[in-house]
Image (tube, coloured by chain):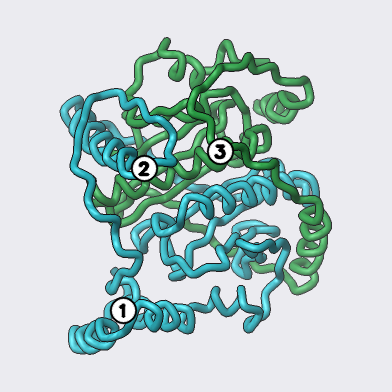
Chain colours: A cyan, B green
Amino acid sequence: MAEQISPEQLKALQEKIKQMTPEELKEFQKKQCVFCQIVAGKIQAKKVYEDDKVVAILDINPVNPGHVLLLTKEHYSIMPQLPDDEVAHVFMAAKAISNSMLRSIDAQGTNIIVANGIAAGQRAQHFMAHIIPRKQNDGVNFVLPQKTMDEKEIEAISSKLISVLSGAGEKEEEKPAIQIAQEAKKESGEPKSGIDLDDISRLLGVK
Amino acid sequence: MAGKESCIVCQIIGNKIPSKRIYEDELVMAVLDVNGANPGHCFVMPKNHYPIIEHVPDVEIGRLFQVSNKISSAIFESLGAQGTNIFVANGIPAGQTVAHFTINVIPRKENDGINLQWQPKQLSEEEMSTVELKLKEQTKNIGFEKEEKKPRIHVPKPVVLSDEEEEYFTRQMRRLP
């Protein structure tokens, strides 16, 4: 990991954060977040779309001209923190913006990319979807290698995922009926807390 | 042009090609990519045949990405991933290889050989403003299909793509050498 802060700094910070109420913590995160300030209009950005839940702005370091960052108005660090209705809304908006690119700026295709976590290429501590207009031979080269897994690994991974997914399905009532390919049962745990201390300390360590 | 009958994803959904299913409901199916970019790489697909995102109704978009998000959470929880990517390619210039809309959910670790980074292009203020105005003009028309109450039972409807719908993909296919 490129960004490191000293263990002392981290400890002091974690102590401080632990003493905050959830409301204070949320406020604290928002103040640290440049994208929350863009959403609030305190930092200038080129907005190309806005509704009650999302704001779309042009990326100032674009892959291609017209590269859009689609942000939730609410502060979430990563996508798993978003409630289902916001997930649906964000990507309906992403679809509409992608369509707009095909019609207005001669895009021949689009990529939609979300990065959750530094290892996935996430740079900002505010959830966003990148919508990237593409053209033939535009010099953009996303690399998704093909790796092989043996039968044992395939089995292990699919049963782990099925186990968690079927557990998640039982937890909530408004969910679609799930027919899982394999019978797998798991006690459903408490939903994860929306706030990750490491996330916050990493953020402060960097900026 | 290839329609539903010759679509490899439709054949996976119709069980004509074996796959490792990890999730299924009346609209969506998710399978493990056995030659994925990382172990645990999953494809999330609508059961109905739609070539690109533009053709997918809003209700199905909502469900597809909600399922993708759950799989992403499951990847964090059960596979010890350090991150996840949600990746969609619309159209051949964007890297789409199969004419059936698909979401990739990819587990990530440091130095795993995947590259979704880019060299930023430098645009002048004028170029930025031009593209801003063009996009803004178009996004004025954005509206969403009214969300229906979540259906539980799926009654498969025959998917008939209009010429116009297939045309986008076809046009790009012709460009290939």
Q: Which three-letter amino acid code belongs to the residue tagged 2?
A: Ile
The residue carrying pointer 3 sits among few (fewer than 14), some (14 to 19) or many (20 or more) residues within 10 Å by Cα, namely some
Considering only vertical position in the picture, is B153 above or below A32? above
Q: Position of residue A116 (x, y in %)?
A: 40, 57
Question: What numbered label is drawn on residue B71?
Answer: 2
Residue indicated by mark 3: B95
Secondary structure found at label 2: helix
Q: Which residue sits at x=40%, y=59%?
A: A81
Disc 1: host chain: A
- In the figure, is residue B124 to the left or right of A74? right
Q: Are marks 1 and 2 on the same chain?
A: no
Residue indicated by mark 1: A201
Secondary structure found at label 1: helix
Q: Which residue sits at x=37%, y=30%?
A: A178
Q: Earlier in the sequence, mark 3 or mark 2?
A: 2
Q: Which residue sits at x=42%, y=39%?
A: A175
- Is the N terminus of chain B in the top left, top right, bottom left or bottom right quadrant? top right
